[in-house]
Amino acid sequence: MEKVIEVEGLYAKYDDRDVLCDVCFSALKGEITVILGGSGSGKTTILRHLLGLLPVTRGQVWVLGKEISSLPEKEMEEMYHQMGVFYQNGALLTSMTVAENVAMPLVHQSNLPRQLIDDIVIMKLGLVNLKEAYGLYPSQLSGGMLKRVALARAIAMDPPLLFCDEPGAGLDPLSLKSLDNLILNLRDQLGISIVLVTHEISSILRVADRVVFLNKGQVAFEGPLKEALSSDIPEVREFFSVTESVGNMPPGGHGR
Amino acid sequence: MNWESSPVQFWRISDNFRTGHQIHFMQSSGSTKTIKVLETGHTRCRLNDNTLFISGSLKVDDAGDFSRAALRALRTLKLPQLTVNLEELDDIDSAGVTALLYLQRKIADRIPRIEFEGANKNVKNKIELFGSDTHIEEKPAREFEITEAVGGSTYSFVTSYLYGFIVLAADVLYWAVADLFKTKTTREGDFVRQSVHIGVNAAFIIIIMSFAIGFVMAVQSSQYLREFGADIFIVDLIVIAVMSQMGPLIAGVLVAGRSGSSIAAEIATMRVTAEIDALKTMGLDPVRYVVVPKLYASLFTIPLLIILSNVAGITGGASAAYYSLDISPEIFISRMDAIMQNKDLVTAFIKSQVYAVIIVLTGSFYGFRVEKGAEGVGRVTTQSVVVSISLVILADSLMAVIFY
């Protein structure tokens, strides 16, 4: 299967502290690849490298067939047209309405007439079930609604590759499930390849095709979710065993 | 019919679109039928009788040019029905689907019935997914009535601004008095910290500004006084102007601009980041915890800043008098003794207290009014500066009328 992302021998440091050490993994086309691991394992650093927001000092990062560390600025800009990014807190511009936020990539990256952009915006908001938020400002939305608008903006240009940074952070289980379903729909109906950074176990179990498990800046495991769940690697086993213990808890919670 | 091999006469509509895609709009008069051909980037269309064949791919890069050019071409026709054949269309995205629906809507008056046919599975799925209704219900615009608008604005001003300001002022006053007797709950070192921020850090700029204004005032008036032989009256002019008006006003306006904005921005940011809520839920009154120390610091430091401003302004005026009118510092000081009144010091002190209350109340009022978001913080900060400077000047004018 075609690779949309390939990372080879990636190292990263903050000051003198090693954050990533010889990281190698790949993400496949049309799949949801989840980068997971505990806090401080280097997940966000990897994502920032994949997005070209951090310079690659050692190693290679290939995104959609191009080595991004050597890409000139112009080509990197074109690369951004092929990517959608869904930030943890939504990162919506508060001075603009929901519609203007979603329209932003279309206005700046395409030559579509205004009326057509408005139609696309309504349609994208419809995809995330938020048509009614069209004229509202981000400050008037709840946390879950903000995330859905951020997702609508990330897919405004129908990018072949979507990055999601902790999409479930701060959401209640029902909102998280509905967001996961939206992400699954994007994969199934649009064939978008998705790279998702998270440590929400319920989310991982629902959406992941493939997982990359990071531990102390190194890839401890890479492969399909099924294999991860039956892995012998202690850190991976421990990570997923938390779910099992929660799943095995008697109804009504502990203490009864 | 193979349109590519047809003898075609074509003319270019435009090759100046942003994407750089050329658009050709070709028309061929064959022996039996007319064929219109349109090519935009990766999308090709041909109109054959009542069927529009679309081939290639129709994605976001081409959808804009396609919709413009196709609309222009199809608007020239009037047909009872049009079939859009998508057999040769390999791929489409949301922008492409929206462009097709947009086209359908725009030509509905000339071609009332449009049908799509022959889409492959991929294209069909995308049309089903993205072909949702793009209609959004708009609330009917209400008729504008001047009386309603004026009444509404007045009501909103009274309920939202005036009432809010009075409630905040009462709250601040209550805690400012109450905290004089309950020092246990105040944050240690806060008064000193705020005094340094509001007073000490503003001293330098106030000294420079007042000195410069006193100097310029003396230089500009000296030539007129010399013409009338009234050189010595430069001292009267400088001392009265600085002591009664310029000194306090310069200090007040600068503190309003500097500390007023800082108070508004600090409180607004605290509200946006839920720090104010955190204080409330910890059982602390935000007004008491955040505003009252600033009020104490302002009440204490602004009189001192006014004294500094007066001294700097008079020094500036004395320097100019020495250089342009040869009035020595000794003469200046002895004349100043005769002019200065205790009343000036008292009014300056009263002004300082009024300014302190205006600056702190306005800054905190706007800070607490912020709505979520970075832009909100900027907006209330600007509003706070404009309003507090205006109120300082208005209060100064009012007190000038009362005291002189």
Image: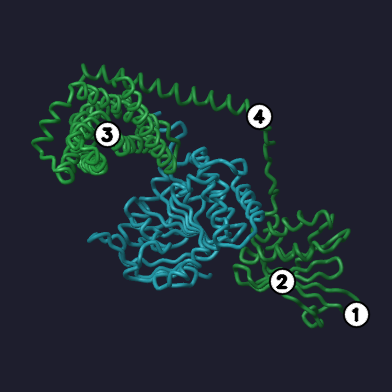
Q: Colour of chain B?
A: green
Label whose residue precedes the other's in the sequence (3 or 1): 1
- Residue at which label 2 appears: B13
Label whose residue precedes the other's in the sequence (4 or 2): 2
Host chain of mark 1: B
Q: Alpha-carbon distance for marks 3 and 2?
A: 69 Å
Q: Alpha-carbon distance for marks 4 and 1?
A: 65 Å
**Horizontal and vertical percent for residue B135?**
70, 46
Task: Give the structural element (helix, strand or loop) at label 1.
Answer: loop
Host chain of mark 4: B
State which mark lies toward you, 3 or 1.
3
Label whose residue precedes the other's in the sequence (4 or 3): 4
Q: Are marks 4 and 2 in contact (CB under 8 Å)?
A: no
Task: Give the structural element (helix, strand or loop) at label 2.
Answer: strand
- Residue at which label 4 appears: B145
State which mark lies toward you, 4 or 1.
4
In the image, farthest residue toward the front: B228
Task: Give the structural element (helix, strand or loop) at label 4.
Answer: loop
Amino acid type for the residue under numbered disc 3: Met
State which mark lies toward you, 3 or 2.
3
Quarter of the figure with residue A134: top right
Quarter holding the C terminus of chain A is: top left
**Horizontal and vertical percent for residue A26?**
44, 66
Label 2 neighbour load within 10 Å: few <14, some 14-19, many 20+: few
Label 3 neighbour load within 10 Å: few <14, some 14-19, many 20+: many
Q: Are marks 3 and 2 in contact (CB under 8 Å)?
A: no
Query: Residue A168, can we see it?
Result: yes
Q: Which mark is residue B246?
A: 3
Amino acid type for the residue under numbered disc 2: Ile
Amino acid type for the residue under numbered disc 4: Glu
State which mark lies toward you, 2 or 1.
2
